[in-house]
Image (cartoon, rainbow, N blue to C red):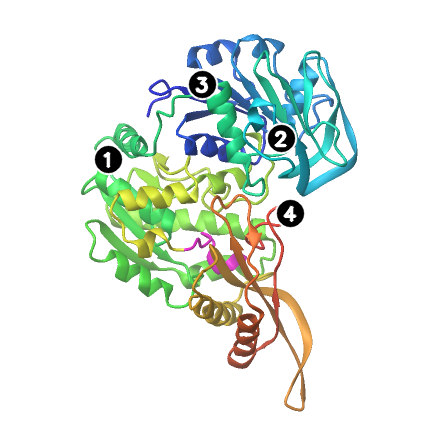
Amino acid sequence: MKETENRLVLVLDFGGQYKELIARRVRECRVASVIKPGRTPLDEIKKLAPIGIILTGGPDSVYKPGAPKAAAELFELGIPVLGICYGMHLMAHTLGGSVEPALVSEYGRIDTEIDTKSQIFAGLDSPQICLMSHTDQVTRLPEGFKTAARTADCETAAMADEKRGLYATQFHPEVENTPRGTAMIRNFLYGVCRAEGDYDLGGYRARMIEEIRGQVGERRVLLGLSGGVDSSVCAALLAEALPGRLYCIFVDHGLMRLGEGDEVEAAFRGRKLHFLRVDAGARFLKKLRGVRDPERKRRIIGEEFVRVFEDEAKKLGGADFLAQGTIYPDVVESGANASATIKSHHNVGGLPEDMAFRGIVEPLRGLFKDEVRKLGRELGLPRALTERQPFPGPGLAVRVMGAVTKEKLDTLRLADAIFREEVSRLRSRPDQYFAVLTDTRSVGVMGDFRTYGCTVALRAVKTTDFMTCEYVPLPHRMLGRVSARIVNEVRGVSRVVYDITGKPPGTIEWE
């Protein structure tokens, strides 16, 4: 899909963590979406001819010097606009309203009274649960606006100028923690923007194949294949686009889960692509020796991956492009396009500048996990690959708190295998579940002896977008069984705890 093939909605990015999630919700509603920087000139916006514009959130306070701004003319184009969080502040500030620090900041799921007569809330009940994440709020409405929602601590949780098609919400309708948020976005798209619903993911495959061929030409591509969902789908897509010119390198960095290296090799050995497994465990452990900071771990691992790829490319007689299964959550958490950096992903923020490749091929960079799974099924991959739970590129290095050693990795591998085995017996499984070896030791008693062993933390979450999540209340009986097995079967562990933190305020991974 080219930008002009469908009636599209323009998402203007002001540094928010959820910009791609907004675009994804729009696509979920079968409407094309394009993301551009908030500073995009008006002439370029007019050329795109969007049927609607959505202003994202962002980390800034609109009243401070240097904060991203928008031209007042943006709201005079006759194009409906929806502002979200910072986007709401920007709309109010630009059109003559007031934005000030909130007396009470709101974070998390908040009961919100909505005006069901407003077009974006049509067909919904009041109150609604909405995700708030703000320290500023609109204190005076611009002329022509009215309050469309409020909470106990936020008098204007949404505002609307129905005549001009201008709407804004303090909360985030794009996240799962606003249960009816997609319905609100759909109301904006179809009730305000008059969308036709002419977009689907089917066009993505054809467009990406065309773009890959245009970028690569007749050259060869080396893909870092981890065996996870993202790199597997990337491999299938590249194999279709570049038959005979794709070389998949599986770097066994010694940071995999129990038995995972052999599973990956077995899954790809029989496929129509060049597959090579590289044993680099000692090499990565040497680079990570004594490193405790998670950002340094990710950057070291990212650079070392590239160095391994470069070495293997030389053995193969050279490769012009490096391909990666990078998806949007990797990009947004690494601080791309003015977003605040949450954590650098090894394949985004960790890439060295002096790579011996002509360029990077990342055909999945604009997709979320569930879209990647759908594309994988369309490409004919088995469910064993497309439904595999996510595993971080840096592997267990970011699930071992503090310095990484072979002994710690072996301990975590066994504890994680026990947890995953027990969870796999449940009828309904979490979307992601794993164990973490913390940097905390605690006193225990085994037999008549005092112990001072490691603490293992267990994590299980439900999510579809992996930008937000809720913890899964696993049965206590099962958790007790897991705890007993880990303490009895894994040497050096004396305590097991369960993480009940959502995202936000936490992240899915610990590091």
Q: Residues within 10 Å of mark 3 (few under 14, many from 20)?
A: some
Q: Distance between the residues labelled 3 and 1?
A: 44 Å
Q: Name the residue under label 3.
A: 194
Cβ atoms at labels 3 and 1 below 8 Å apart: no
Q: What residue type is labelled 1?
A: Arg
Q: Name the residue under label 2.
A: 58
Helix, strand or loop at disc 1? loop
Q: Mark 4 points at which residue?
A: 505
Mark 2 and mark 4 lie on one chain; the one further toward the N terminus is 2
- Give the residue at x 31% y 45%: 376
Q: How crowded is mark 4: few (under 14 residues within 10 Å), some or many (20 or more)?
A: few
Mark 1 and mark 4 lie on one chain; the one further toward the N terminus is 1
| Direction from residue 146 to residue 21 in the image, left or right | left
Helix, strand or loop at disc 2? loop
Q: Give the range drawn in magenta.
A: 389-398
Residue 72, position as x, y percentages in the image: 62, 10
Q: Does the magenta stretch include residue 390?
A: yes
Q: Mark 1 points at which residue?
A: 219
Q: Determine whether 314 is above or below 456 in the image.
A: above
- Residue 232: tell me if it is visible: yes
Mark 3 and mark 1 lie on one chain; the one further toward the N terminus is 3
Q: Which of 284 and 183 is in front in this view?
A: 183
Q: Does the magenta stretch include residue 234?
A: no
- Give the residue at x 39% y 19%: 7
Helix, strand or loop at disc 3? loop
- Give the residue at x 51% y 59%: 397
Mark 2 and mark 1 lie on one chain; the one further toward the N terminus is 2
Mark 3 and mark 4 lie on one chain; the one further toward the N terminus is 3
Residue 257, position as x, y percentages in the image: 43, 64
